[in-house]
Amino acid sequence: MHEGVITLGIETSCDETAAAVVRQGREILSSVVASQIEVHRKYGGVVPEIASRRHVEAILPVIDAALLQAGLALDDIDAVAVTYGPGLVGALLVGLSAAKGISYALGKPLVCVNHIEGHICANFLAHPDLDPPMLCLTVSGGHTELIAMRDHGCYEALGRTRDDAAGEAFDKVARVMGLPYPGGPALEQLAKSGDADLISFPRAEVEDSPLDFSFSGLKTAVINYIHSAEQRGEKISYPDVAAGFQKAAIDELVTRVHRAAASTGMKTIAVSGGVAANQALRKALTALALEDGFKVHYPPLSLCTDNAAMIASAGYFRYAAGEVSPLSANAEPGAALTSLQHCSGQVAAGGYTGRL
Ligand code: KG4
Ligand code: ZN
């Protein structure tokens, strides 16, 4: 017999096969992540077909390992939470099919979770006393989102990227510099020995949308800088390029958080997603928080990048609010983050309907 609501989380949206067991949406009983990074590295990015095949091989052993580490059996689980999108459709289907199988065979409720909501909820695992309202900055390889979370499961989109995601820009710039995939951590490392003020790259503004992001101009500017220098036969200081790029990207993120905090009056910020692992970003946001008088939260590094504990947490909050998903639920590669039914009165007209 166990206490509290136990959710099994399953995540296979990209290149991590993950399963986790979480109590009450807050306490991690186990979290297992089988990363495919090594497999995809030689191609310089995720190959969807290979990702799906690897997920098929790993999914059942990973779920077994998560249960074993938690000291629980499938029967002890109260609900199965699974990422249904956004992500790679073939990859998503593996996790979703496994979750549906468990749900159907054992009669356990299925809760479909949006991957972005999972990233946001990573903060609830790391900070037991954290609750909305809060401003959420989610920055990963596929997403750059600024969201006002009014209550658990109640979202209002404030801004998003118009082109590349922040992590995608890190990855592409890193690739041009010959760094291994995923480029973010390698670029951050290289930037440490560079001078961020030596090369000034552009900071984008999206016309009439001060909370939206755009990283493709910055990415192109860095690539052009490198190519022009190469053509002129000039020696390139890659650490300085990395530091200049990183500073420009972080400036763009920080200005949006500053504007959103001012316009919403929200005093709590929760940062999440793979790029939230970046120490320079954390430093810049912590400095802004001090200046602007808000509190900023980050998950530990292990919960910034893809994992299933965050999905189990998000699933808990949906389940606790009475939401369960039908077994006919399908993978949605472009799934939009949706609020819970009861939020409709609180979410600004239009809510969150855009593709991620
Ligand atoms: O959240 P995540 O694991 O997967 C997605 O949902 O996309 O994020 C992966 C992304 C990659 O683009 C990776 O380069 C980036 O997060 N990333 C970083 C750092 N660590 C991971 N970017 C900048 N600095 C880092 N330290
Ligand atoms: Zn992610």
Image (cartoon, rainbow, N blue to C red):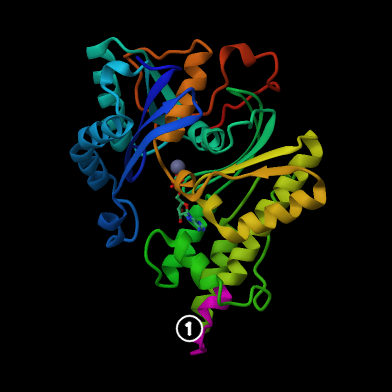
Please check the rendered image and state whether residue 190 is part of the magenta-colored stretch, yes or no: no
The quadrant of the rendering that contains the N terminus is top left
Residue 95 versus residue 77 in the image, above or below? below
Magenta segment includes 237: yes
Residue 279 in the image: above or below residue 315: below
Q: Is residue 350 shown above or below 33?
A: above
Badge 1, how many Cα within 10 Å: few under 14, some, many 20+?
Answer: few
Q: Helix, strand, or loop for circle 1?
A: helix
Q: Residue at x 75, y 53 (%)?
A: 288
Residue at x 52%, y 44% (from the top left corner) = 143
Residue at (28, 50) in percent of width and height: 36
Mark 1 highlights which residue? Answer: 230
- Percent coordinates x, y for residue 127 in the rendering: 59, 36
Q: Is residue 250 left or right of residue 101?
A: right
Q: Position of residue 233 (x, y in %)?
A: 48, 90
Q: Is residue 245 placed above or below 40 in the rendered structure?
A: below
Relative side of 307 to 200, left or right: left
Amino acid on which the number 1 mark rests in the picture: Glu
* Residue 209 seen from this side: no
**Image location of residue 101, percent across then percent down:** 24, 19
Direction front: furthest residue: 1
Q: Nearer the viewer, residue 191 or 210?
A: 191
**Label 1 lies in ligand 1 vicinity (Cβ under 8 Å):** no
Which stretch appears magenta? 230-241
Residue 192 visible in the snapshot = yes
Apparent side of residue 232 relative to residue 212 in the rendered image (left or right): left
